Amino acid sequence: MDSGTVSGIVTVVFIVVFIGIVWWAYSRGNKQRFEDAGKLPFSEDDTPDKQGDKQ
């Protein structure tokens, strides 16, 4: 195998992996999970303040 063949195989593998990741990210089953994770920074924190934190 020459370098062109290896380069072509690697390119095809990366394209397939990319399409798999995009399919996984946009699948309906993950929508609620991603929405919940996106709202996480805006949720209230109920943990007590760290010692030394001043408000």
Image: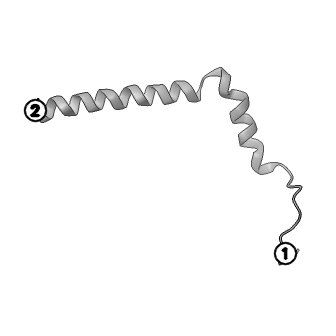
Q: Residue at x 66, y 21 (%)?
A: 28
Give, as a three-letter code, the residue at label 1: Gln
Is residue 48 shown above or below 55? above
| Type of the residue with mark 2 | Asp
Distance Cα–Cα, label 1 vs label 2:
63 Å
Q: Quadrant of residue 47?
A: bottom right
Residue 21 at x, y percent in the picture: 50, 30
Assign a secondary structure to mark 1.
Answer: loop
- Residue drawn at 58 percent across, 30 percent down: 25
When the figure is inspected, residue 39 is found, relative to residue 47, above or below; the finding is above
- Residue 16's label in the rendered image is none
First in sequence: mark 1 or mark 2?
Answer: 2
Residue 5 left/right relative to 42: left
| 22 and 47: which is toward the camera | 47
Residue to which mark 2 is pinned: 2
Seen at 55% across and 26% down, the residue is 24
Which image quarter is the C terminus in? bottom right
Residue 51 numbered mark, or none = 1
Q: Observer-nearest residue: 49 or 43? A: 49
In the rendered view, does 34 fall on the left or right side of 24?
Answer: right
Residue found at x 37% / y 28%: 15
* The residue positioned farthest toward the top in the image shown: 28
Q: Is label 2 in a helix, a strand or a loop?
A: loop
Left or right position of 22 against 38: left
Q: Is residue 52 left or right of residue 4?
A: right
The colour mode here is one colour
Q: Residues within 10 Å of mark 2 (few under 14, many from 20)?
A: few
